[in-house]
């Protein structure tokens, strides 16, 4: 039996759809830039986990809501996070999630998932540039600013994501 006709009917397409709250290809030069660009997350009533894919110049090329959870948690798996990053041909990713309580201090689970996603990114060659926890009143926590991410792979200070010598 020849399945070639059936197989040809399947394909993966990447669609660029611009959100009202984010300019396409905005450059994220600092954690403050990220917090400002995703400020809409401060007002969400449930925890949302969002992925921003960036190119080699830290410009946003794709944004994807990975998970919408409850008041206190959301389920995040590396497979769902990096599927979008791979399809978007990302050079790196910025992870974000909000705390509806308003307190941006990361939980132990936030730290564990960040480590797990950072490890998955290293294996795939798509580094985690930062993970921000968005709180209320312009408050946020940056794992990169706090030194909780591998500093040898990514940096807001440089234009290009690359390993430092």
Image: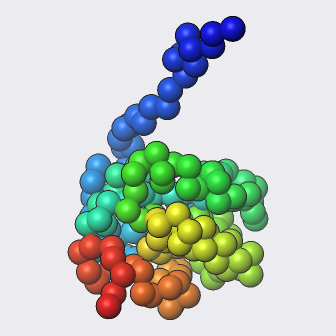
Q: Is residue 134 left or right of residue 1?
A: left
In the rendered view, would you say 27 is above or below 44? below
Pick the residue in front: 109 or 82.
82
The image shows residue 132 at horizontal and vertical percentages of 52, 73
| Image point (39%, 79%), residue name | 154
Q: Is residue 161 left or right of residue 74?
A: left
Quadrant of the image containing the N terminus:
top right
Label tally: 0
Whether residue 134 is visible to the viewer of this picture, yes or no, is: no
| Image point (72%, 54%), residue name | 69
Q: Is residue 23 left or right of residue 21?
A: left
The image shows residue 142 at horizontal and vertical percentages of 50, 80
The image shows residue 103 at horizontal and vertical percentages of 63, 77
Quadrant location of residue 15?
A: top left
Pick the residue in front: 60 or 38.
60
In the rendered view, would you say 82 is above or below 35? above
Quadrant of the image containing the C terminus:
bottom left
Pick the residue in front: 87 or 8.
8
In the rendered view, would you say 95 is above or below 80? below
| Color theme of the render | rainbow
| Image point (52%, 63%), residue name | 124
Pick the residue in front: 48 or 102.
48
| Image point (42%, 87%), residue name | 152
Quadrant location of residue 134?
A: bottom right
Whether residue 119 is visible to the viewer of this picture, yes or no, is: yes
For the view shown, which residue lies furthest in the front direction?
Answer: 1
Q: Is residue 21 left or right of residue 117?
A: left
């Amino acid at each position: 039996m020849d399945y070639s006709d059936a197989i040809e009917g399947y394909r993966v397409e990447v669609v660029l759809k611009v959100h009202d709250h984010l300019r396409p290809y905005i450059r994220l030069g600092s954690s403050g830039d990220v917090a400002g660009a995703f400020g809409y997350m401060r007002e969400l009533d449930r925890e949302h986990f969002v992925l921003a894919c960036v190119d080699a110049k830290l410009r946003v090329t794709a944004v994807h809501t990975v998970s919408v959870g409850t008041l206190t948690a959301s389920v995040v798996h590396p497979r769902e996070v990096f599927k979008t990053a791979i399809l978007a041909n990302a050079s790196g990713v910025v992870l974000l999630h909000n705390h509806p309580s308003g307190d941006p201090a990361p939980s132990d689970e936030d730290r564990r998932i960040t480590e797990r996603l950072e490890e998955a990114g290293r294996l795939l060659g798509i580094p985690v540039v930062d993970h921000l926890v968005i709180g209320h009143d312009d408050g946020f926590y940056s794992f990169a600013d706090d030194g909780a991410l591998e500093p040898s792979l990514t940096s807001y200070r440089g234009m290009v994501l690359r390993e430092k010598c």
